[in-house]
Image (cartoon, grey):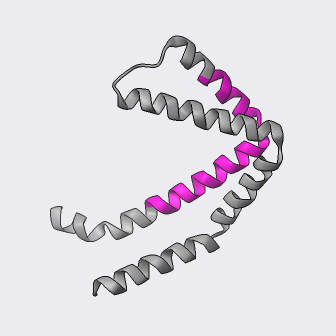
C-alpha cells in the first residue's frame, strides 16, 4: 500500500469517527455543559486545575496538600454534576474505541517484535 492510500485511509477513519454514536454523544454532552453556567464553570475550572497539576508533575514536583484537597473537592462536585458525568461517560467510550484502533494499527509492528 502506498503512503497516499494510507493517508486516504486515515482521513476516512477521521470522517468515520465523526459519525460514531459515542462522538455524537460527546458533542451533545459538551453543548449541554456550555449552555449550563454552573456545569461550564466547574468543567473549565477542573480542566485548568488538572493542567496545572499535570505541568507540576512534568517538572517533577508534587502538588501541595492544599492543591490535592482542592482537586478532591472539585472531583466530588464533578461526580455530582450529571452534565459532566454524561460527557465523561461518552469520552470513556471514545477512549476505548481509540485504544482498539491503536491496537489494530500497531499490530504489524507488534508482530515484528514479538
Vertical placement of residue 48 versus 96, above or below = above
The residue drawn where x is 74% and y is 54% is 29
The residue drawn where x is 65% and y is 47% is 88
Q: Position of residue 68 (x, y in %)?
A: 55, 19
Q: Is residue 108 left or right of residue 40?
A: left
**Magenta stretch secondary structure, dominant:** helix
**Nearer to us in this view, 49 or 26:** 49
- What stretch of residues is rendered in magenta? 71-99
Q: Quadrant of the N terminus?
A: bottom left
Q: Position of residue 8 (x, y in %)?
A: 42, 83
Q: Position of residue 67 (x, y in %)?
A: 55, 18
Vertical placement of residue 19 versus 3, above or below = above
Assess whether residue 72 is covered by the magenta stretch.
yes
Vertical placement of residue 91 versus 98, above or below = above
The residue drawn where x is 60% and y is 24% is 71
The residue drawn where x is 82% and y is 49% is 35
Task: Specify the quadrant of the image occupied by residue 114.
Answer: bottom left
**Nearer to us in this view, 3 or 106:** 3
Task: Specify the quadrant of the image occupied by residue 70.
Answer: top right
Amino acid at each position: 500500500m502506498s503512503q497516499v492510500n494510507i493517508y486516504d485511509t486515515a482521513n476516512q477513519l477521521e470522517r468515520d469517527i465523526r459519525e460514531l454514536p459515542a462522538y455524537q454523544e460527546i458533542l451533545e454532552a459538551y453543548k449541554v455543559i456550555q449552555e449550563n453556567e454552573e456545569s461550564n464553570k466547574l468543567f473549565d475550572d477542573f480542566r485548568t486545575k488538572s493542567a496545572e497539576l499535570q505541568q507540576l508533575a512534568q517538572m517533577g514536583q508534587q502538588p501541595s496538600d492544599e492543591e490535592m484537597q482542592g482537586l478532591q473537592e472539585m472531583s466530588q462536585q464533578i461526580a455530582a454534576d450529571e452534565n459532566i458525568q454524561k460527557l465523561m461517560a461518552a469520552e470513556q467510550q471514545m477512549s476505548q474505541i481509540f485504544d482498539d484502533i491503536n491496537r489494530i494499527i500497531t499490530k504489524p509492528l507488534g508482530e515484528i517484535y514479538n
